[in-house]
Image (cartoon, grey):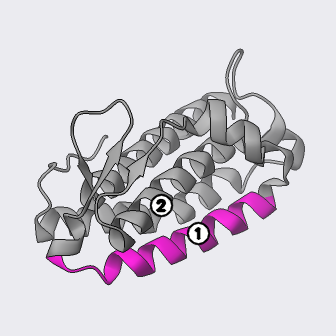
Amino acid sequence: MKPKISTTPTKANIKKVLQLLEEMPGHLERLSARLSDAELRKPLDEGERSFTEDLAHLLNSEALTAQMIYMALLVEEPYFDDVHPERHWGKLVRFEQYSFADLVAYYKFRRTVLLNVLRSLTDEQWERVIREEGKQRKESVYWRARALALHEHDHLTDLQGKLAKIK
């Protein structure tokens, strides 16, 4: 079931976002634990990504989101060009080429860093904003962290459903 988290950065909503972000690495590890290296690289269904490719996608999205969050905390209203996590970033870094174990370790480390930053924020810092090419609205640190948490949750729920069908 998809969690409902308001777009308003209240203490309760921030707590929910942090909890979702904190839980994701453990969920990812539990889902992948029963799969062999070959199964981790095999598409989960026809025309679908493999588990490794899905993790690469999560890392691509997290990398751009985290960069925006960090810059929002360092610079007044930073501006970001429209860089797509897959079409641009993913083609550059090619995470899917790495072993699943390395990707999981990297994901966990990045998540630890992000959570350490987010847990230290004041109410005002949660509301700091970025500007992004092609978007009229400014997006806050809270908005970006919430979007990341919900995006990852959707992917892991999808993976769970696909894996249930396979085994």
Please identify the quarter of the rendering in which residue 83 is found: top right
From the top left corner, tell me how far across and down residue 14 is, in percent: 22, 66
User: Which residue is nearer to you in this view: 158 or 68?
Assistant: 68
Residue type, label 1: Arg
Q: Nearer the viewer, mark 2 or mark 1?
A: 2
Outermost residue toward the top in this view: 46
Q: Nearer the viewer, residue 17 or 114?
A: 114
| Three-letter code for the amino acid on which mark 2 is drawn | Ala
SS category of the residue bearing label 1: helix
Judge whether 126 appears above or below 86 on screen. Answer: below
The part of the image, by quadrant, that contains residue 88 is top right
Residue located at (78% from left, 43% from top)? 94
Q: Is residue 78 left or right of residue 125?
A: right
**Residue 167: percent from left, percent from top:** 69, 35
- Please provide the residue range marked out in magenta: 101-123
Viewer can see residue 163: no
The verdict on residue 104 being magenta is: yes
Kindly report the distance in space between the C-alpha atoms of the residues bearing marks 2 and 1: 9 Å
Above or below — where is 32 with respect to 118?
above
Residue 124, x across and y down, in percent: 16, 73
Contact, mark 2 vs mark 1 (Cβ under 8 Å): yes
Decide: is 49 above or below 120.
above
Q: Is residue 78 magenta?
A: no
Q: Which mark is residue 110?
A: 1
Q: Is residue 77 visible?
A: yes
Residue 66, labelled with which disc?
Answer: 2
Q: Is 41 positioned to the left or the right of 112 in the image? A: right
Please report the residue visible at 38 percent of the width from the left and 73 percent of the height from the top: 74
Residue 128 placement (x, y as % from top left): 23, 64
Q: Quadrant of the N terminus?
A: top left
